[in-house]
Image (tube, grey):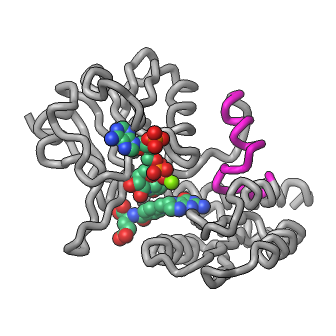
Amino acid sequence: MTARIIDGKALAERVRGEIAARAAGLAARGEQPCLAVLLIGSDPASAVYVRNKVAGCEKAGIRSLRFDYPADAAPEVVMAKLAELNADPAVHGILVQLPLPLQFDEAAVLEAISVEKDVDGFHAENVGRLSQNQEAFIPCTPHGVMKMLESEHVPLSGAEAVVIGRSNIVGKPMAMLLTNAGATVTVCHSKTRDLAFHTRRADVLVAAVGKPRFVTGDLIKPGATVIDVGINRLPDGKLCGDVDFDSAAAVAGAITPVPGGVGPMTITMLLENTVISAERAARRKGL
Ligand SMILES: NC(=O)C1=CN([C@@H]2O[C@H](COP(=O)(O)OP(=O)(O)OC[C@H]3O[C@@H](n4cnc5c(N)ncnc54)[C@H](OP(=O)(O)O)[C@@H]3O)[C@@H](O)[C@H]2O)C=CC1
Ligand SMILES: Nc1nc(=O)c2c([nH]1)NC[C@@H]1CN(c3ccc(C(=O)N[C@@H](CCC(=O)O)C(=O)O)cc3)C=[N+]21
Ligand SMILES: [Mg+2]
């Protein structure tokens, strides 16, 4: 058996077409969507992601503002910029690229972004709203994964879902969304005693570990849907996921590739959240 490949890039293109149409409609009513991106420090991977986000905005007709700070930037300077962006009615979304240098209190920075402009969905209030299944900005990576599962018609109600990873930006919100969709969810992490016991039961397996080719075919239930969130750069410069693609594809029913899987959908959901925020602003102004 060899798995069907879930083409995140193609789905992202389709969804971005719809987002661009909504952005154009907003611009015509005088409310062009606008995303502000703050990058602190010079981590090369972060710089690539930020560039992809800004380019994605450009193509979708979303204005983007980019603010770059040196690695030793004073937190007060960044906090002052966030206050300014929160107050600027032309700005609909604010994203502070993570991880932050050590002098920053990450939670404090995320709380400083206005809930209405928190298009990453990382603010504690949005996290709480998601956990209560209320309307919220949904974190982009797990939201993108849900869109991929939906477009593939993967049944979730009653399914066994296993998430490897419990981070605030991927694993935990992923588990929440799958729970809200009716799956029976197990969250595994570095303290999990028998990982294979859990993963081999999974109809849907999401890997967000941060370790190249960590999930091998022997951990996968035959026919399962395998979602690879991982982005790892190998010494030869190539990207690879948290899943060992070749051994996994021999067992799985469907699988996402890296690159071209979850990554492009993450950016797409960021663009969508920015447009949603602008639509809310337009509605408030009666446009
Ligand atoms: N495609 C995309 O759009 C995105 C991709 N990523 C990628 O996804 C991956 C995960 O990101 P992120 O969640 O931020 O990473 P973190 O490092 O924050 O979390 C990794 C998680 O994996 C768990 N883990 C580590 N080792 C093991 C192990 N041996 N067995 C089981 N669990 C283990 C950790 O457990 P513990 O909590 O116990 O330490 C932790 O919960 C990375 O490769 C990242 O680059 C991230 C964001 C977006
Ligand atoms: N505040 C914040 N929000 C984030 O959403 C956020 C973050 N911080 N910090 C880092 C992670 C990582 N992340 C990715 C986004 C797109 C790709 C992506 O486009 N990947 C392409 C390849 C990119 C490449 O060529 O390097 C792909 O998988 O095909 C990857 C990773 C968002 N993150
Ligand atoms: Mg992390």
Find residue 44 and report its horizontal and vertical position in percent.
44, 78
Tell me which segment is drawn in magenta: 115-132
**Viewport quadrant of the C terminus:** bottom right
Closest to the observer: 237 or 277?
237
- Asked if 53 appears above or below 146 in the picture, the reply is below
> Is residue 177 rendered magenta in the image?
no
Whether residue 27 sits left or right of residue 210 in the image: it is right
In this view, the residue farthest toward the top is 158
Residue visible at 68% across and 58% down?
A: 106
> Is residue 117 rendered magenta in the image?
yes
- Asked if 274 appears above or below 54 in the picture, the reply is above
- Kindly report the secondary structure that dominates the magenta region of the rendered protein: helix
Closest to the observer: 42 or 135?
42
Whether residue 176 sits left or right of residue 225 in the image: it is right
Q: Quadrant of residue 2?
A: top left
Residue visible at 71% across and 60% down?
A: 105
Find residue 225 and report its horizontal and vertical position in percent.
29, 33
Q: Quadrant of residue 155?
A: top left
Q: Is residue 212 visible?
A: yes
Number of residue marks: 0
**Viewport quadrant of the N terminus:** top left
Residue visible at 57% across and 31% down?
A: 176
Residue visible at 45% across and 75% down?
A: 48
- Asked if 98 appears above or below 168 in the picture, the reply is below
Q: Quadrant of residue 168?
A: top right
Q: Is residue 17 visible?
A: no
Find residue 234 and report its horizontal and vertical position in percent.
25, 67
